[in-house]
Image (cartoon, grey):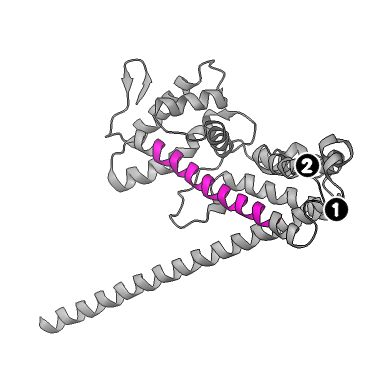
Amino acid sequence: MMLRRGMSVGQNLTAKQAKSDLVALFEDVDKDHNGAIDELELSKLFKMLNIPLPDQVEDVRTLFIIMDTLKTGKLEKDSFCAVFEEEIDWRASMHGTIDLDEIIKSKLSQFLADSRAQRVQIIQAFISAEQKIEKDGKGFGKGYWGGKWKHFLFNHFFTQATSNFLSMTLEPALKCNASSSSRPPPARIRSRRQSCFEAVGGDDRYQLLKKHLTLAASGLHPGLNQALQTNKDLLRELMNPEVVSDFSREWLTLLEGLEHAHMIVLQNASTAEANANNGLLEQDGVEDKCKNVAA
């Protein structure tokens, strides 16, 4: 992996060398040398590392949100390095030397896999909410005439979601949380069985979606309420504006149901793993006793 012209990363690095090369990588991508990189500069990093992005726009935006742990809208050096530093230290302690290129690719690919799994769950709940509204007699021709309002919700609540749409209720708290630390917390090593709803950074996006839906379901969403009064597409399509609250409530309920079901699967898997480990310990104990008897 080229960091600068004539400079490359080897496979047998110490933790100190890997962190130094990580800084060099950031500085190489930071073409305007302003101490931070934007989404365009981040996309160039993926090309350098030969990381395939099936959905270029969505994947770059997702990774940018995940890595921007300070929530400043720009990816600073500390935030960038913090994503990989704990993994570097852990692998160095286990193996002595590490391959920085492999760590970066693995971590970013992991983030994308988590995010895509989460997105599938969100879309699944969205479609099921549509079906539930239709089944309850509030669907097409009864509650609304078109589908632009549903795309409006999906875009503003998830795809292009920001806290600005919640500015009257949530922005002060979000700003307070963002400024509570001068350095982002280290990115934790994700368990293989960690829920897709708890992906590092991506969880912020999921929780923001739930906040949007909670307020919309109660009719107290300031941005949505304003749009319902001023957006021509929404005014033209919605026969009964209450269908928006009903749809949001169904979407939220289905999301929480999927989340709960997924957590049960994880808990069962953890229990099975613990039982298997206990069985191995018991077997080891029996073998030790047999050896002592034979001796």
Pointer 2 residue: 166
- Kindly state the secondary structure of the residue where label 1 is placed: helix
Q: Mainly helix, strand or loop, the magenta region?
A: helix
Above or below 140: residue 222: above
Residue 247 appears in view? yes
Residue 23 visible to an observer of this rendering: no
Relative height, residue 279 to residue 100 (above, below)? below
Q: Residue at x 54, y 49 (%)?
A: 199
Secondary structure state at the residue bearing disc 2? helix
- In magenta segment, residue 125: yes
Q: What type is the residue that disc 1 sits on?
A: Glu
Label at residue 242: 1
> Which residue corresponds to the image point at 71% horizontal and 60% vertical from the top-left?
132
Q: Residues within 10 Å of mark 2 (few under 14, many from 20)?
A: some
How many residues crowd around disc 1 within 10 Å: few (fewer than 14), some, or many (20 or more)? some
Say which label, 1 or 2, has the lower sequence index: 2
Which one is in front, 224 or 247?
A: 247
Q: Which residues are magenta?
A: 104-129
